[in-house]
Image: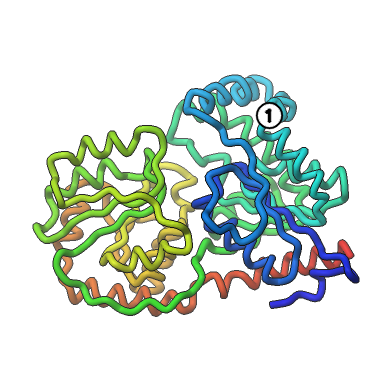
Amino acid sequence: MQLRTAHIGAYMIRVALVCISPLRHDSRVLRHAALLAGAGYDVRIFAQAPLPDSPPTPVTVLRGPGSDWRVRFGMVFRQAPATLLPASADSLYWASSIKLAARRDLLKYRPDLVIANDWRSLPVAFAARRASGARIIYDSHEFAPEEFSDSWRWRALARRHVMRVEDRYIRKADAIVTVSPGIAEALAERYGLSERPVVISNTPSWQATAFRPTGSPVTVLYHGAVVPRRGLETLIASLPLWPADYRLIIRGPTQGQFDQHLRGLAGHLGDRIAFEPAVAPHQVVATAAQADIGIFLLSNSTTHARFALPNKVFEYMQAGLMLVSSDLPEIRKHVESTGCGLLLPQDAPKAIAACLAGLDRDRIDACKRASLEAARRVNFEAESTKLLTIVEHLCQSTA
């Protein structure tokens, strides 16, 4: 779709996507960049390495956060003071050389529009507004005030800093988008927004995926970040209780030594479990389609978890998998409206095993067909028109 506002005369409107996190597996940022470049805008991504092999647009690479101890150091010395003195969050934000470099590089680009991905990018984006009058879209991938609220360290050291930064800028953005209705409602309520953020679900592009009948063994897939708080230890603990012809694949990028911890827990399970590296975003769906069931575990103990509607849910559907998930409100809506899977009564080993043991191949195949049918309606092509409309409107006012 070519938008008439992508140019002002011979001048091509510049759009920057700022993402102060690794770009390689951020499929949302990559999709949005490709969409806007295809619509005729001059698009540049500002993000940390590692990068995908073939990014859709030019990328200005920001230095990464470094080792785990550097991340902890940053939390203690650049975020914790805001717990006692909230006003310090503003100045301490800029005590980071990464943020300063991001600001410097963004101002050199002189964007007309900045899409700030998550709260970490907001002050950088608003520096471009002050310098060149750039319009701002805030894309909130998570509900930042509660993102890690199950960690007492995060609550004690970082939460007030995060809330202060988001609170200072969010109402000044020209448009706000997010990934789920629950986060949209929570943001509107917490910050007294005059308009509810626009929901642009984190869906993959539609691609034709052939239905694959369930055979033997039955393959259960978890794909996504291999990090704590994703229920992976519980999933491994449940595996000995699964039917004998079920196996598990855990696929995704790792953090620290957590994957080694999981491998230690799974050492006695032999070939019933496999750990695989992440694949490129454009290969996620096709690779997932080799499995039968996509599983997602997330405790319902936090506000953030209750709003969860992660990209893996839509990727599992696009790949033609049955979905088995924690019983979270946003996911429940999709399961009930599409018939694509089952919700777990508990995120506990015996409950997971009982759910899988109660399935037969006919039930799995019915859910797989339902996923494929739903994916024709719920995909990036359907969602992308919302972003294009917002960008066009803002660029018209810029022109």
**Position of residue 29 in the picture relative to residue 3 (left or right):** left
Q: How is the image coloured?
A: rainbow
* Residue 142 visible here: no
Residue 239 in view in this figure: yes
Q: Residue 282, position in %: x, y? A: 47, 63
Q: Quadrant of the C terminus?
A: bottom right
View extreme (left): residue: 244
Q: Label 1 crowding class (10 Å Cα cut-off): few <14, some 14-19, many 20+?
A: few
Image point 52% across, 51% down: which residue?
24
Residue receiving disc 1:
97
| In the displayed structure image, the side of residue 257 where residue 79 appears, left or right | right
**Which residue ends up furthest to the front in the rendered image?**
53
Q: Position of residue 247 (x, y in %)?
A: 18, 56
Position of residue 171 measured from the top left corner of the image (x, y, whole percent): 75, 48
Instruction: Determine the residue positioned at 16% across, 52% down.
Output: 272
Count the marks: how many?
1
Considering the image in quadrants, where does the N terminus appear?
bottom right
* Residue nearest the viewer, comparing 213 with 383: 213
Q: Is residue 229 above or below residue 15?
A: above
* Residue at position x 67%, y 43% in the image: 121
Q: Is residue 152 positioned above or below 207 on the image?
A: above
Asked if residue 297 lies left or right of residue 116, the reply is: left
Q: Secondary structure at mark 1?
A: helix
Q: Nearer the viewer, residue 381 or 331?
A: 381
Residue 306 in picture, x, y percent from top left:
45, 50
| Rendered residue at 27%/76% (across/down) | 212
Compared with 316, 307 (above or below) is above
Indicate the amino acid at tag 1. Ser
